[in-house]
Amino acid sequence: MDETPRRGPATVVELTAQLRRFAEDREWQRFHTPKNLAMALAGEVGELLAELQWLTPDEATLVMADAERGGRVRAEIGDVMIYLTRLADVLGIDLLAAADDKLVEVARRYPADEVRGSAAKRT
Ligand SMILES: [Mg+2]
Protein backbone atom coordinates (compact mmCIF):
# COMPACT_ATOMS: atom_id res chain seq x y z
CA MET A 1 0.00 0.00 0.00
CA ASP A 2 1.27 3.46 -0.88
CA GLU A 3 2.09 5.34 2.31
CA THR A 4 2.89 8.61 0.54
CA PRO A 5 0.50 11.26 1.83
CA ARG A 6 -1.70 12.65 -0.90
CA ARG A 7 -0.62 16.13 -1.92
CA GLY A 8 -3.42 18.30 -3.23
CA PRO A 9 -3.04 21.15 -5.68
CA ALA A 10 -1.04 24.10 -4.33
CA THR A 11 -2.20 26.67 -6.87
CA VAL A 12 -5.25 27.49 -8.96
CA VAL A 13 -3.24 26.46 -12.03
CA GLU A 14 -2.61 23.03 -10.50
CA LEU A 15 -6.26 22.66 -9.46
CA THR A 16 -7.36 23.65 -12.97
CA ALA A 17 -5.10 21.00 -14.51
CA GLN A 18 -6.23 18.39 -12.00
CA LEU A 19 -9.91 19.06 -12.72
CA ARG A 20 -9.31 19.02 -16.47
CA ARG A 21 -7.56 15.65 -16.18
CA PHE A 22 -10.36 14.38 -13.93
CA ALA A 23 -12.93 15.23 -16.62
CA GLU A 24 -10.78 13.84 -19.46
CA ASP A 25 -10.16 10.56 -17.62
CA ARG A 26 -13.93 10.08 -17.43
CA GLU A 27 -14.69 11.53 -20.87
CA TRP A 28 -16.91 14.12 -19.22
CA GLN A 29 -15.71 17.09 -21.29
CA ARG A 30 -18.85 17.01 -23.44
CA PHE A 31 -20.97 17.45 -20.31
CA HIS A 32 -18.81 20.31 -19.09
CA THR A 33 -20.40 23.01 -21.21
CA PRO A 34 -20.41 26.54 -19.82
CA LYS A 35 -24.17 26.31 -19.30
CA ASN A 36 -23.97 23.03 -17.40
CA LEU A 37 -21.03 24.16 -15.30
CA ALA A 38 -22.69 27.47 -14.46
CA MET A 39 -25.84 25.61 -13.41
CA ALA A 40 -23.80 23.15 -11.34
CA LEU A 41 -22.00 26.08 -9.72
CA ALA A 42 -25.32 27.72 -8.84
CA GLY A 43 -26.56 24.42 -7.42
CA GLU A 44 -23.51 24.10 -5.20
CA VAL A 45 -23.85 27.72 -4.02
CA GLY A 46 -27.44 26.80 -3.13
CA GLU A 47 -26.18 23.83 -1.10
CA LEU A 48 -23.77 26.15 0.71
CA LEU A 49 -26.58 28.60 1.42
CA ALA A 50 -28.76 25.79 2.73
CA GLU A 51 -26.16 25.07 5.40
CA LEU A 52 -26.41 28.65 6.68
CA GLN A 53 -30.02 29.43 5.84
CA TRP A 54 -31.72 29.09 9.21
CA LEU A 55 -28.82 30.04 11.44
CA THR A 56 -28.75 33.32 13.29
CA PRO A 57 -25.95 35.69 12.20
CA ASP A 58 -24.01 34.71 15.32
CA GLU A 59 -24.51 30.98 14.69
CA ALA A 60 -23.36 31.43 11.09
CA THR A 61 -20.24 33.28 12.25
CA LEU A 62 -19.38 30.35 14.52
CA VAL A 63 -20.41 27.61 12.09
CA MET A 64 -16.92 26.15 11.76
CA ALA A 65 -16.81 25.49 15.53
CA ASP A 66 -19.45 22.79 14.96
CA ALA A 67 -17.46 19.89 13.52
CA GLU A 68 -20.36 18.28 11.68
CA ARG A 69 -21.95 21.40 10.23
CA GLY A 70 -18.56 23.01 9.64
CA GLY A 71 -17.51 19.92 7.71
CA ARG A 72 -20.54 20.24 5.47
CA VAL A 73 -19.83 23.95 4.87
CA ARG A 74 -16.22 23.09 4.00
CA ALA A 75 -17.39 20.41 1.56
CA GLU A 76 -19.79 22.81 -0.18
CA ILE A 77 -17.07 25.47 -0.43
CA GLY A 78 -14.95 22.79 -2.11
CA ASP A 79 -17.76 22.01 -4.57
CA VAL A 80 -18.16 25.71 -5.38
CA MET A 81 -14.42 26.07 -5.97
CA ILE A 82 -14.35 23.01 -8.23
CA TYR A 83 -17.18 24.18 -10.47
CA LEU A 84 -15.98 27.79 -10.53
CA THR A 85 -12.48 26.66 -11.47
CA ARG A 86 -13.74 24.24 -14.12
CA LEU A 87 -16.09 26.88 -15.59
CA ALA A 88 -13.28 29.41 -15.81
CA ASP A 89 -11.07 26.82 -17.52
CA VAL A 90 -13.70 25.88 -20.10
CA LEU A 91 -14.29 29.58 -20.85
CA GLY A 92 -10.56 30.33 -21.03
CA ILE A 93 -10.75 32.77 -18.14
CA ASP A 94 -7.75 33.28 -15.87
CA LEU A 95 -9.55 33.07 -12.55
CA LEU A 96 -7.00 35.03 -10.53
CA ALA A 97 -6.69 37.73 -13.20
CA ALA A 98 -10.48 38.07 -13.38
CA ALA A 99 -10.73 38.39 -9.60
CA ASP A 100 -7.84 40.85 -9.53
CA ASP A 101 -9.46 42.98 -12.25
CA LYS A 102 -12.67 43.09 -10.22
CA LEU A 103 -10.80 43.99 -7.05
CA VAL A 104 -9.14 46.92 -8.84
CA GLU A 105 -12.54 48.06 -10.14
CA VAL A 106 -14.21 47.78 -6.73
CA ALA A 107 -11.29 49.54 -5.03
CA ARG A 108 -11.71 52.42 -7.49
CA ARG A 109 -15.45 52.61 -6.76
CA TYR A 110 -14.97 52.28 -3.01
CA PRO A 111 -11.88 54.27 -1.96
CA ALA A 112 -11.06 53.18 1.58
CA ASP A 113 -10.85 56.77 2.87
CA GLU A 114 -14.36 57.53 1.57
CA VAL A 115 -16.28 54.41 2.54
CA ARG A 116 -14.61 53.13 5.70
CA GLY A 117 -17.26 51.64 7.99
CA SER A 118 -20.10 52.11 5.48
CA ALA A 119 -21.90 49.31 3.61
CA ALA A 120 -23.74 51.76 1.32
CA LYS A 121 -23.81 50.67 -2.32
CA ARG A 122 -22.15 52.89 -4.93
CA THR A 123 -22.89 52.74 -8.64
MG1 LIG B 1 -22.37 19.93 -2.83
Image (cartoon, rainbow, N blue to C red):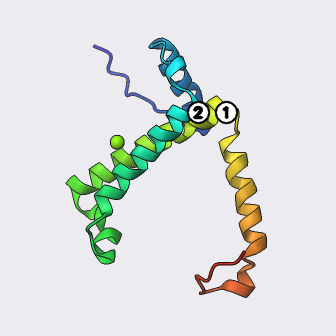
- Residue 35, x across and y down, in percent: 55, 34
Nearer the observer: mark 1 or 2; the answer is: 2
Name the residue type under label 1.
Leu
Depth check: give the residue in front, 104 or 37. Answer: 37
**In the picture provided, is 101 more to the left or to the right than 52?**
right
Q: Label 1 belongs to which residue? A: 91
Tell me where residue 85 appears, x and y as whole percent: 56, 38
State the separation of the CA atoms marked 1 and 2: 7 Å
What quarter of the picture does the C terminus occupy? bottom right
Helix or strand or loop: what does disc 1 sit on? Answer: helix
- Dot 2 falls on a residue whose secondary structure is helix
On residue 78, the disc is: none
| Residue bearing mark 2 | 34
Q: Is residue 3 left or right of residue 123?
A: left
Horizontal and vertical percent position of residue 61: 35, 71
Task: Determine whether label 1 and label 2 are within 8 Å by CB.
Answer: yes
Report ligand 1 position as a quadrant: top left
